[in-house]
Amino acid sequence: MLSSFVGAWIALVLFGVVAVLVAVGIVAKLGASSGVSANVSKGSVLTIELNGVIEERETPLDIDYISLMRRDISRPQTLENLVMAIREAKANNNISAIYLKCGGVSAGLATLNALREEIKAFRESGKPVIAYGDYYSSGDYFVATAANHLYMNPAGQIALQGIGGTSLYLKGLFDKIGVTFQVVKVGTYKSAVEPYILTEMSQPARAQLDTLYSNMWRYIRETISDGRADKVSAAAIDTLVSRDFIFLKSGKEVEKTGLVDKLLYERKMDEQIASILGKDVKKLNFVEPSVLVDPAELASALSSKRQIAVVYASGQIVDGGGAATINFEKFVPLITRLADDDNVKGMVLRVNSPGGAVFGSEQIGEALDYFQSKKKPLAVSMGDYAASGGYWISCCANRIFADELTITGSIGIFGLIPNVAGLMDKLGVSPQEVATNPEAEFPNGFKPMDERQLAAMQKYVEKGYDKFVARVAKGRKMKEEKVRSIGEGRVWDAGNAVRLGLVDEIGNLQKSVEWVAEKCGLGENYSLASYPKIENSFWNMLPEMADMNADGAVAKAVEGNYDLLLVKYARKVLSRKPVQALMPEFDIRFIEARPL
């Protein structure tokens, strides 16, 4: 009993010590991030790593135990933070240049275009942008062509191959396992159901994608050509891609085409950057985007009395769901609260959604109508997608902006009802139904709908489509006949969407903010507040605390009076789920031969 008591007491004291240490480290980290200029020495270079995923905006971190064990707790970069960092770098006299390190970025085309446009705007300050890649993916290269100087590893490649996509048609698979689907839909082009009921793409579906991809690729190749100062023409890019297989060419062959300026190994890049900036290579100071994003400034905007709210609607629209979705149960109260907040003068709804639940879309749309009833201007800024339900929540805004590479429209509704009777038969399962009414379990996944039921379901979907059409007609001030002619579930590129009246103009998020500010009479005197709020919990800070820099931050905070192992243990303890059944920890290791 005594040993147990002493052990518990020691554990409590130890936990208290490590908790204080980590808390001090976090405070030091937060404190250090305020006052951006003070943390950036003169002549610094903002380094942007173009690799991995770039998401629209940061979402709360969902950590699982396996990730913790593997220390795989990094979070993706976000367009929001990168844009803020680039704008700060443009205004900050201590930043001399931007260095783009390319290595395989994964993001939507509109996201990449928005990032590229911000880099172009940075160049207007007269500061250079320098890009380097051992290997350029198409997305890397598209962004990198906004740079003044573009370098590639002599053994590198540029994977420029056009744009496209592959859809997996699964009817053959479902036939084998005994699952069939009944479809009710409105819209000739509403092809989301096709992979479940067909073995190949329908002609209307293929035609709309051909048009969509062709228009987007035209913009991309022309943009690349402009970025290369016409060293390679848009037509030549098509030739390089389709005839010459440029992605298989050597570095020297790529250099001759004008796609890159010079071949260099990465170890030479510091010298090259120093030469461009006229600096001593030993005095180069590379800073990450996070250094230039000031949390204190973001927090103060939430309490401003001259506030423009930017509400991020990213992911599928769902009736309940996680952080990476648009959950109407959380979204509607947020919009209502902003409508009733006198400090909020207007709103930009940033939509990056392929759609989702009809009910959730309708609820969000009604909440946005309530916001506008308060005589507050509402603009929509479209990201990679604002289609179907994403367009439903967008169409009644006072002004709609889209990126050149936004995909929008898809005005249509469908229902997909599975029938697993064949699968049950293969498994030897015999479903037996007992009900008071014939339609008590309609639709029933164990048997197909009869003609009467199917007709009732079709009518239900058509009513939903009528409601969708009416909403678009009201919001875009069109006749319903015109909406139906451009609806039918068809997706549109931004250029065609403007021509058809589905979008008002091409413009980025900042342009939509400026429009709202003008309508509010705020001019340039406004604060920009982002919603939903991201809770500053320890869990969200964990990725930044997980590397050795976090240990150094804590060490600095306690002026070196610390034990490194204790700091690591503190991180480990506080990164666990609150409740666990865990055996005592032992430092058991295999003796391993390290590779030379």
Image (tube, rainbow, N blue to C red):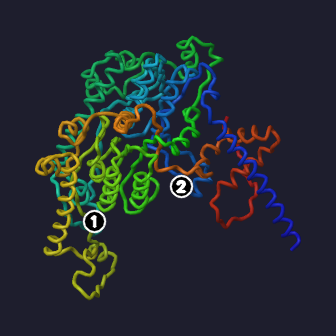
Residue at image x 59%, y 28%? 287
Pick the residue in front: 225 or 260. Answer: 225
* 585 w.r.t. 292: above or below: below
Residue 109: tell me if it is visible. Answer: no
The C terminus appears in which quarter of the rendering? top right
Per the image, the residue denoted by label 2 is: 62
Other residues around mark 1 within 10 Å, as few (<14) / some (14–19) / many (≥20) = few
Please, what secondary structure does the residue beneath circle 2 have?
loop
Q: Which numbered disc, 2 or 1, marks the residue closer to the eye? A: 2
Residue type pointed to by label 2: Asp
Q: Are marks 2 and 1 in contact (CB under 8 Å)?
A: no
Residue at image x 27%, y 52%? 392
Residue at image x 72%, y 51%? 570
Q: Across the whole image, how many numbered discs are drawn on residues? A: 2
Direction from residue 368 to residue 172 in the image, left or right: left
Residue type pointed to by label 1: Lys
Per the image, the residue denoted by label 1 is: 176
Direction from residue 272 to residue 330 in the image, left or right: left
Please, what secondary structure does the residue beneath circle 1 have?
helix
Indicate the quadrant where residue 421 lies.
bottom left
Residue occupying the far left of the picture: 481
Pick the residue in front: 256 or 538. Answer: 538
* 227 w.r.t. 382: above or below: above
Q: Earlier in the sequence, mark 2 or mark 1?
A: 2
**Residue 391 percent coordinates (x, y):** 28, 49
Residue 378: tell me if it is visible. Answer: yes
**Residue 265 percent coordinates (x, y):** 53, 21
